[in-house]
Amino acid sequence: MTTTAAAPQLPVDVRRFAFRQGPGKGHLGEQNLVDDGAPTTSALPPRWARSDSGRPLPLGTHELLAGLPYPAPGRAAATPDPLGHLLVTAFGLQRREPSHRYADHRSVASGRAKFPVHAFLAQGPSVRYLDVYRHALVDLAPPGGAPAPAAAEGASVLLAARYSDLPAAYGRMRYAVTEVELGVNLRSLCVAADLFGVPARLDLDGRSTAAAEAVVRSAGPGTWSAPLAVRLDLPDGPAASTALPGPSLDGPDRRDPLLETADESVRDAVAVSAQRHGLPQTLSVPAHGLPAAGPEAAAGSPATGPDWARVLWDRSAGRAPDQLYGFAMRPAAVGEDTLADLLAWATQPPPDRLLARVAARVRLSVAVQRVGGLAPGVHRFEAGGLTLHRRQPRIMAELQPGFAQQPSPNTDSGMRHAALVWVHSVDVDALLDEFGPAALGLLQLHLGWSVHGLCLGAAAHRLVARPARSFVEYHLQPLLGLGRKETPVFMTVCGTSRFTEPMLDLRT
Ligand SMILES: Cc1cc2nc3c(=O)[nH]c(=O)nc-3n(C[C@H](O)[C@H](O)[C@H](O)COP(=O)(O)O)c2cc1C
């Protein structure tokens, strides 16, 4: 193992930073009310990624996915554009829900559906930005000429999160949400690569991160996280650029000044994220998003079970009518095969040796009610299986006050009816002692990786899965039987939705 780059100086105490957006947020006044009307840069393409040329994405991705049974897809139908279909599968638009507070939904969950993670495709001298609303890979056209060339051979998808896409009231919490979403999008990309049979590798070392950052910076002003670079093994080079259809976006936008926003909390987030620049180069491993070992066709035989088009369409963090916040659930029994399938998704190690070592320090607990013959209460994932830690018939009702958004005239919370509440927890101090300050970011990447797996598994079994970063740590800790130093760092609430409605199909 050789170190390729020095970690940049850290002008912020990473433990205090983690505490301020974790257990300390209530005490330290870091949990602000979020005004959904406050402007953000969400869905705004970077300044030099609005050109009129690029490469249109292919049509018919969901039709191809409809031919792939869940969970093991077999061979994807041969297509002339596996890369295009892969990107649409991983990041594309799915549906518009008229009653939803945040109407448009994609393959991935995102805090308040702000989608702060952006994808770039770098192939040799060609750098393009994935614009899901234009359904195109748009040529980067910086004013000084060509964008920074990609360092790696072949094709790399670069994922970077932009802090100004989230409401400023999130403060330091923007760090955790965006880094977790990098993990979510990484998993989504790796699942899509598996579905289309494209080998993928994550280059997490500092040198690859720096090269990717140069590319992202050439997209124009913006305050970004450290990027992730995922290499895709594709036979073809970049397709030639063509004129893109539709009205030109090539020009300034009234929200451009917000791209320059960098308050103190963003500066801290940038500094902590940049710790990934100091990661050593290790031998990369194949990045598989699908679980290596899971129950065979847990949701049915390949002939009767869901297909991948349906799984992505059904992936939902839950719904509520009349633009209420939150999610409505109803009590419903869940089979043990569902639990086993979700467990396989959640515990598939992330695709990097160091990341997997960090992941191994994180405890996964699941609170259950009405799940097969399992005792209601808290179970822990230990030695490859679940063990009952605390029998508690009223566990969900007890957990509910620990969710940040409580039932109120403008909010529904169905947590008390959830079948499964997954909680990731870790001793953050011990993790930082063992792996250094970059471990905080690695932790978030693992959380996103694991949680997106839960979201897909839940969708396959017609459950909704609400990822949540905003909860009361001190409320959850004793209910889950965690030690004083062990902090809950993410929560995913799974159950059966009480509300549904006709939806507008945004797939192409
Ligand atoms: C990293 C992350 C953090 C989130 N945190 C919360 C949260 O604290 N509370 C909540 O109610 N929803 C949370 N969500 C869920 C989003 O609000 C939800 O994904 C979004 O509204 C889009 O809906 P959809 O997932 O059904 O497409 C989070 C999602 C992600 C990916």
Image (cartoon, rainbow, N blue to C red):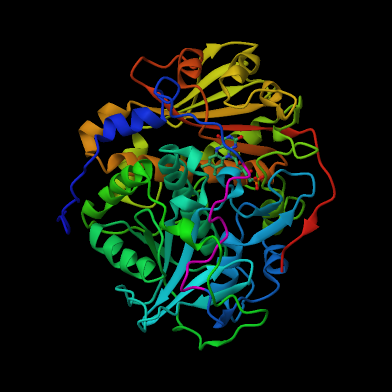
Give the residues drawn in magenta, as a range: 36-49
Q: Determine whether, in the image, residue 393 is placed left or right of residue 346.
A: right
Tell me which residue sits at (31%, 68%) in the image.
214
Quarter of the figure that contains the C terminus: bottom right
Q: Nearer the viewer, residue 105 or 71?
A: 105
* Spot occupied by residue 394 in the image (x, y as percentages of width and height): 65, 11
Against 67, is 490 above or below? above
Depicted 228 relative to depicted 297: above or below: below
User: Would residue 3 be found to the left or right of residue 286 on screen?
Assistant: left
Say which residue appears at 45% left-offset and 55% top-offset. 162
* Left or right: 248, with 482 as reference point: right
> Taking the image as four quarters, which one is ligand 1 found in?
top right
Indicate the position of residue 157 as horizontal and vertical percent values. 43, 67
Does any portion of residue 82 appear in the rendered image? no
Residue 328, image x and y in percent? 74, 31
Number of numbered discs on residues: 0
- Provide the major secondary structure of the magenta segment: loop
**Do we see residue 334 in this rendering?**
yes
Closer-to-camera residue (117/300): 117
* Image spot of residue 238 (x, y percent): 46, 83
124 within the magenta span: no
